[in-house]
Image (spheres, grey):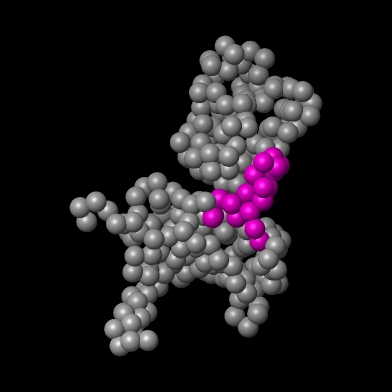
Amino acid sequence: MTILHFYCWIIIVIAEIKMLELRIPSCADRLKLVRSVVNCAGQMFGFKDEEVDSLVLAVNEACMNIMQHAYCEREGEIILEIIDKHNELVFRLTDFADTVDKSCIKPRDLSDIRPGGLGVHLMQEVMDDVSFFDGPNNKGNVVELSKKLQQREGA
Amino acid sequence: MMEFDVTTEDKYTVIALKGEVDLHYSPTARKQILKYLGKNQNVLVDLSQVDYIDSSGVASLVEGYQLAKNNQIKFGLVGASDAALHVLQLARLDKIFPMYANLKECLDT
């Protein structure tokens, strides 16, 4: 690593700013609150309206997945962190449910018309990256959704 | 918040969903859709006043579509709002559901 690379790395690390941390119970009636927060964060960050709608859809789907498949509609807590990574906005959702086998989390074949199973597809369709990890100390699960801010004309 | 109205138009029961069809409210939408399909009534779901729909709401529509298909009764979507249409397009379902711009278009078909 050259000195220039090292300084660039330092600048990128420093540029990571946690905009918000929200702890919510795993209840479907809190999804509206999550959507409102994501909407505000997306607008503050400078995304266009249709991009903000996509962020809201993706984070809502990620929360739903946790409620339905990690906590299996039982009680639990979800932490939403919104992180400003210079020109990229990252949504990190952490749960404390049993660890889920990440190899099982994949989009389904859309030609198979049936109810359910669309969440991962929708997240991947509208975000630049969707990654699943085990939680700290192999407890719980973490999903990170990120989207880069496109350079605007005249910006 | 989601509300719904149920009306009858010609040979169709029209279920108009209004507001946000998310995980909290989609069970209500599902119940209404399956209730009328279960009575062998043709069903149209009016999505013109839907501000938001997630995959659980879409799943309710798919369930209705499949039940109608199996029972050979009519099921379709009317006047999908931009928000609803966007999600249906992302799920590649806009080409699967019978979709009509408005009620008149459906009744004239």
Identified at 40% across, 46% down, the residue is A50
**Looking at the image, residue B22 lies above or below residue A12:** above
Left or right of residue A85: residue B76? right
Q: Nearer the viewer, residue B99 or A150?
A: A150
Q: Quadrant of residue A137?
A: bottom right
Q: Residue at 63% across / 32% down in the picture?
A: B96
Query: For this rendering, which residue is in front, B40 or A126?
Result: A126
**Residue A29 visible from this viewpoint:** no
A109 within the magenta span: yes
Determine whether A72 is above or below A81 in the image. above
Q: Residue A46, position in %: x, y? A: 31, 57
Residue A107, position as x, y percentages in the image: 63, 54
The secondary structure that dominates the magenta segment is: loop
Note whether residue A57 is visible: yes
Percent x, y of residue A119: 60, 52
- Stretch of the chain drawn in magenta: A105-124
User: Closer to the camera, B57 or B29?
Assistant: B57
In percent of the image, x 65 and y 22: which residue is there? Answer: B13
Does A115 appear in magenta?
A: yes
Instruction: Residue B14: name its quadrant.
Output: top right
Residue at the limit of the structure toward the front, as seen here:
A2
